[in-house]
Amino acid sequence: MSTTIEVTGVQPSTITVGRDLGFDPIVAALDSAATKVLIVHARPLASRAQALAEHLRSLGYEAATADHPDAEAGKAIDVVAGLWDTCGRLQLGRKDAIIAMGGGATTDMAGFVAATWLRGVSLINVPTTLLGMVDAAVGGKTGINTSVGKNLVGSFYPACAVVADMSLLSSLPREDLAAGAAEVIKCGFIADPVILRIVEETDPDVLLDPSSEQLAEITTRAVAVKARVVSADLTEGGLREILNYGHTLAHAIERANDYTWRHGDAVAVGCCFAARLAHARGQLSSEDVARHDELFSRVGLPTRYEGHTLAELTHIMASDKKVRRGVLRFVLLDGIANPRTEAVEPGELAAPAEAIGIRP
Ligand code: GLY
């Protein structure tokens, strides 16, 4: 069984979430005039990428595969340049396609190649991590890292189709599933309380089992939240900022730790911090603050941070993309499922930070 979610707006796309989807939804997403396909994949997925290439060849397409260095090392300009050369050797044309198969680093980087080769060829994302399914592969953010920072070069370039096959998660380590669950729970807090109820009522072993109905349900719901938001605001002119709930502190924690922290772990801490900030402003009850800690820790995610001082983290947060005229802005809840971006004075950070273990 599968669910199809439509992203509307200037660049529509279709997201399919299901189990044992096979290659059919990928083939169906190819343009009728396509004759060539380049499959860009993370190295551990070589055999699946080859199987897809052989399937495409059996249908008459010219198909090639290209791997890339793992994780953030793959999001580099020399990797992109190598793939531009591969596109050139293949004579990949405007109606042809790039299929990105892997986690967020793969879909970010291969999406950037698709956005730039011939000023844009079809992109089909096949995310193989939970984080990729609910976040990176959906919504069109593509990009690479440079010597001056992460994700500073890129474009908004949505895949025409995202094929999220839950059966591909079966070999994912539990910590990576939990890190993906952080973004799912975040979607619950900003827009879909049913996600929160399912997380509360489901045994964590079942919830993080890739074959469970509950994981499929909350994944589909989180994708639907993201699809609704990016349908209204693809290029982050306003509403899309709500997807950044918990991310202001999370990005600072990740950067302070040279990106050795999992993104989802940092998001969990960031949401628990933002909940306390909203509580201090009278916008969120103490029960809802406690609910943040309970839900994230229920799936094994951290809710406290003791590594760097608030002064160090605030210095990093001053470069956050939401800062306006030097003023920090956070996505805060005014009650569950009612997020908005608000300016925050540095003095307001101390008590919420202390409450989650951050020293001044
Ligand atoms: N990860 C947040 C966004 O896609 O806007």
Image (cartoon, rainbow, N blue to C red):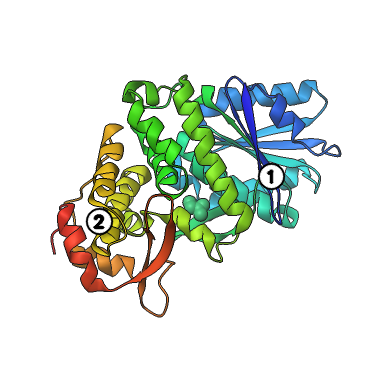
Q: Is residue 51 above or below residue 311?
A: above
| SS label for mark 2 | helix
Residue 257 spot, x, y in % from top left = 27, 53
Quadrant of the rendered structure where residue 46 is? Answer: top right
Left or right, 42 with reference to 246:
right
| Most foreground residue, 234 or 88 | 234
- On the question of residue 229 being in view, the answer is yes
Task: Please determine whether, in this image, residue 132 is positioned above or below residue 358.
Answer: above
- Note whether ligand 1 is within 8 Å of mark 2: no
Q: Is residue 168 left or right of residue 302?
A: right
| Mark identifier at residue 13 | 1
> Quadrant of the image for the C terminus?
bottom left
Q: Position of residue 81 (x, y in %)?
A: 61, 52
**In this figure, which residue is indicated by the disc labeled 2?**
276
Badge 1: residue crowd in 10 Å (few <14, some 14–19, many ≥20): many
The relative height of residue 357 versus residue 349 in the rendered view (above or below) is above
Q: Residue at x 59, y 49 (%)?
A: 228
Question: How far is mark 1 from mark 2, CA to CA?
Answer: 36 Å
Give, as a three-letter code, the residue at label 1.
Ser
Residue occupying image coordinates x 74% and y 29%: 27
On screen, residue 147 above or below 124: below
- Tell me where residue 102 appears, x and y as whole percent: 53, 35
